[in-house]
Image (spheres, rainbow, N blue to C red):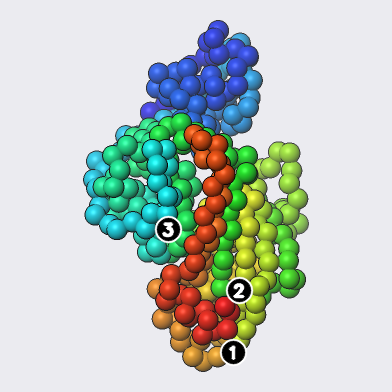
Amino acid sequence: MTLSFICTEEMVGQRLDKALALRPEIETRSRASYLIDSGAVNVNGRPVKASLILKSGDHIEIQLPAPASTELVGYEFSLDILFEDDSIIVINKPSGLVVHPAAGHAQDTLVNALIHHAKDLSMKFGEQRPGIVHRLDKETSGILVIAKTDQAHENLTRQFKERSIHRIYYAACIGAPKTGKGTIQSYLARHPGDRKKYASVLGKDRKVQMQKHPEPSMGKWAVTHFELLKKSSGLSYCKLKLETGRTHQIRVHLSENGFPIVGDHLYGADKKIKNIESRQIQTDVKNLNRFLLHAGELGFTHPLSGEKLFFSQDWPAEITALLKSWGLL
């Protein structure tokens, strides 16, 4: 559904996100921010930021999400809950669990499990992602925070946008970074040849654009800080701190820099298995049913109380044992 209108008198001089919250189809600033950040809002034919101050005569066009094609139903699944109150739920997501409904996973996702567990999640537009503020790939394990109210959703979304959220990931990689510590940055967009993948945007010189530009032609700016913790048998164990949270960000950045995540078939890990020095480890890697990326730490400010919260979670026991046998832990 497309919503098209001219800026009203009460919207003039307001930030775009606050102004859109005045519309009955949107109602809250968190929903307005969601639409703006997802590229669904144009002002005078151009995508804009939430901070844009509206002027008289501005033409606003919004692509509202279509209603959910299927009704969400509960999924009886035992959640590993680290914290819960009336505003938020913090869980330790297992590998193999898809976060929200998608092709091939209509009713067996984290969202369905959350609906079975709690009836009062932040529903936003009724799309099939109630409460979801950020996400982890299906095969990634680790910590997620979910909003139970629109107020919590808006507050957490703002914290992620302002990059005040503390997020640490751990990865086992084939190969190793050239330096002990460093930062990888680029614009990420859909891969030009494979729609399932993402890739860093190349400049006119066919090199990755590693400097931020005021008006990027395409893609979203992504920054990953890495630290090499250990090397063994042609593998490495890395700690990763996210400054931004783009789709497949860590996977793309590590792969493009020569040390893909163990088990990440989509981003070229299979081609490097031969570089692993141990035949037994090669066999272990081939038998994996996931790639080895784990969201180990999450810290944020509670959206209602203002309390600083911090959570840490180890790898699943079977992966911890495997990493120890490989000499990485």
User: Of marks 3 and 2, which one's residue comes earlier in the chain?
Assistant: 3
Q: Residue placed farthest to the bottom in the image? A: 279
Task: Tally the numbered discs.
Answer: 3
Marker disc for residue 277: 1
Callouts 2 and 1 close, C-beta under 8 Å: no
Decide: is 261 above or below 122.
Answer: below
Q: Is residue 102 visible?
A: no
**Mark 3: few, some, or many residues within 10 Å (few <14, many ≥20)?**
many
Relative depth, front residue between 242 and 49: 242
Relative depth, front residue between 4 and 174: 174
User: Mark 3 or mark 2, which is nearer to you?
Assistant: 3
Decide: is 52 above or below 243.
Answer: above
User: Of marks 3 and 1, which one's residue comes earlier in the chain?
Assistant: 3
* Residue that badge 2 annotates: 237
Give the Cα distance between marks 2 and 1. 15 Å
**Mark 1: few, some, or many residues within 10 Å (few <14, many ≥20)?**
few
Query: Can you give x and y, in whole percent of width and height, for residue 320 in the image?
Result: 48, 75
User: Of marks 2 and 1, which one's residue comes earlier in the chain?
Assistant: 2
User: Mark 3 or mark 1, which is nearer to you?
Assistant: 3
Marker disc for residue 92: 3
Query: Can you give x and y, in whole percent of width and height, for residue 42 in the image?
Result: 55, 28
**What residue is at 72 percent from the left and 59 percent from the top?**
183
Q: Check disc 2 and give the amino acid type.
A: Tyr
**Mark 2: few, some, or many residues within 10 Å (few <14, many ≥20)?**
many
**What residue is at 60 percent from the left and 51 percent from the top?**
166
Q: Check disc 3 and give the amino acid type.
A: Asn
Query: Can you give x and y, in whole percent of width and height, for residue 179 in the image?
Result: 75, 71
Image quarter of residue 7? top right
Q: Check disc 1 and give the amino acid type.
A: Glu
Query: Can you give x and y, in whole percent of width and height, for residue 226 in the image?
Result: 67, 63
